[in-house]
């Protein structure tokens, strides 16, 4: 009887430990719906290079608009993405790329933009297009851009999260913390949408 009771207790203990392990290791996935804005594009940058988001191998892209002379939002956002990246394991880090699109084509060259964003991140691409192309992309992503009298540019501060088909799945606000960014990348990267 004692042996039976001891064996029963051991089985209950092992079962409890198994549930604890599953609870800790199985992180819930966030739900993502397709949003009717943003998405893929194929445009030539100011150097004549054709840029298409589908050419990137990463299943998750973080796209946002900014400029190298930006005094606050742009450096803060790049720093936040860097902080989010540091919360991820190596496999998840390689599952996403940040894409920075300049809204200041007069002052930002493709080389300048790439150098600027590379100061913050490794897996990042920065682009500068001519004014007409920039305007098209701003419209495609329903972004807001307005030049001010003091030479700065007011602009929307959303980060667009794109899947493997380059469909916009989520908008991250600038007020959200690095942990929210990390969870979003991790969840979409763990269940990637395969390119069509």
Image (spheres, grey):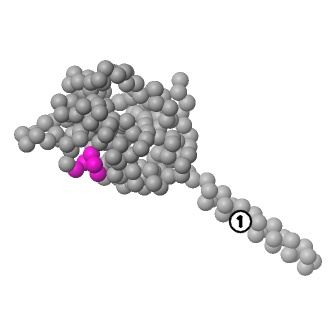
Q: How many marks?
A: 1
Identify which residue, 192 or 111, lies in the foreground.
111
Q: Is residue 2 above or below residue 143?
A: below
Looking at the rendering, which quadrant does residue 16 occupy? bottom right
Looking at the rendering, which quadrant does residue 112 occupy? top left
Asked whether residue 106 appears in the rendered view, the answer is yes
Which range of residues does the magenta coloring cover?
Answer: 72-76
The secondary structure that most of the magenta stretch takes on is helix
Looking at the rendering, which quadrant does residue 22 occupy? bottom right
The structure residue drawn at horizontal position 61% and vertical position 53%, both measured from the top left corner, is: 26
According to the image, label 1 marks what residue? Answer: 17
Q: Residue 13 in magenta?
A: no
Residue that protrudes farthest toward the bottom in the picture: 2
Q: Quadrant of the N terminus?
A: bottom right
Q: Is residue 30 left or right of residue 116?
A: right
x and y, in percent, of residue 70 in the image? 21, 44
Identify which residue, 90 or 8, lies in the foreground.
90
x and y, in percent, of residue 40 in the image? 40, 26
Task: For mark 1, give the secondary structure.
Answer: helix
Q: Is residue 126 above or below residue 20?
A: above
Q: Residue 73 in magenta?
A: yes
x and y, in percent, of residue 144 in the image? 22, 35
């Amino acid at each position: 009887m004692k042996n039976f009771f001891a064996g029963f207790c051991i089985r209950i203990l092992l079962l409890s430990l198994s549930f604890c392990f599953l609870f800790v290791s199985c992180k819930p996935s966030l739900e993502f719906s397709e949003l009717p804005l943003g998405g893929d594009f194929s445009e030539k940058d100011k150097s004549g290079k054709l840029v298409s988001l589908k050419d990137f191998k990463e299943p998750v892209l973080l796209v946002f608009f900014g400029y190298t002379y930006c005094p606050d939002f742009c450096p803060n956002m790049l720093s936040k993405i860097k902080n989010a990246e540091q919360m991820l394991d190596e496999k998840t880090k390689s599952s996403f790329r940040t894409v920075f699109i300049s809204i200041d084509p007069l002052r930002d060259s493709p080389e300048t933009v790439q150098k600027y964003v590379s100061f913050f991140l490794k897996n990042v691409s920065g682009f500068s297009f001519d004014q007409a192309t920039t305007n098209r992309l701003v419209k495609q992503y329903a972004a807001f851009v307005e030049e001010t009298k003091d030479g700065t540019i007011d602009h929307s501060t959303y980060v667009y999260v794109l899947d493997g088909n380059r469909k916009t799945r989520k908008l991250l606000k600038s007020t959200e913390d690095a942990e929210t960014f990390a969870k979003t990348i991790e969840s979409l990267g763990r269940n990637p949408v395969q390119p069509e």
